[in-house]
Amino acid sequence: MERFLKQYSPYLYATLRRIFAGLMFAMHGSQKVFGIPGDKSPVPLASLLGVGATLELVCGLLIALGLVASYAAFIASGGMAVCYFVMHFPQGFLPILNQGELAVLYCFLFLYIAAQGSGVWSIEALLGGREKPAVLT
């Protein structure tokens, strides 16, 4: 199986990790900033939650598009670490018990994206940036 999938690893990385994770993260932000998707009312932007929501929206879009994705993912990773320790950790240590598993998952996923870069199917690749296609070893 490894031989078969290895040739597709840069494309799977771009699809799953960068594009879908970035878009899902951006949707969390748009839900808090604009109330879309869903019927939730927007949060005040001048609050801690509003700052986090703005980071989610902007960093999520930059990651999905592959534009300065390493920097955006590093910032998003730090934001999710702060989110976990401020919002979830006070309710208990284990993420599965304090409903912080999504924050922890995003934190480490974005840390990985920060290390890997934008990869294929990115704006940086189209512009001939220094980002090389991700090769997972």
Image (cartoon, rainbow, N blue to C red):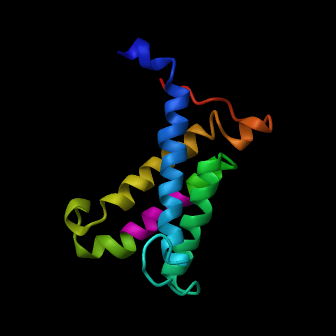
Q: Main secondary structure of the magenta part?
A: helix
**Magenta residue span:** 75-84
Q: Quadrant of the N terminus?
A: top left
Residue 124 quadrant: top right
Q: Look at the image and say whether residue 79 sits in the magenta stretch.
A: yes
Q: Above or below — where is 60 with respect to 84?
A: above
In depth, the one of 15 and 96 nearer the eye is 15
In the image, 87: left or right of 73? left
- What x and y, as percent, mark residue 40? 43, 80
- Residue 50: x and y in percent read 53, 80
* Left or right: 40 in relation to 115: left
| Residue at the (38%, 61%) spot, across then down | 103
Residue at the spot x=57%, y=53% of the render? 73
Q: Position of residue 25 (x, y in %)?
A: 49, 59
The residue lying toward the viewer, choosing from 85 and 42, is: 42
Query: Is 15 a magenta residue?
Result: no
- Place residue 94 in its image quadrant: bottom left
- Position of residue 25 relative to residue 54, above or below, is above
**Residue at position x 54%, y 70% in the image:** 30
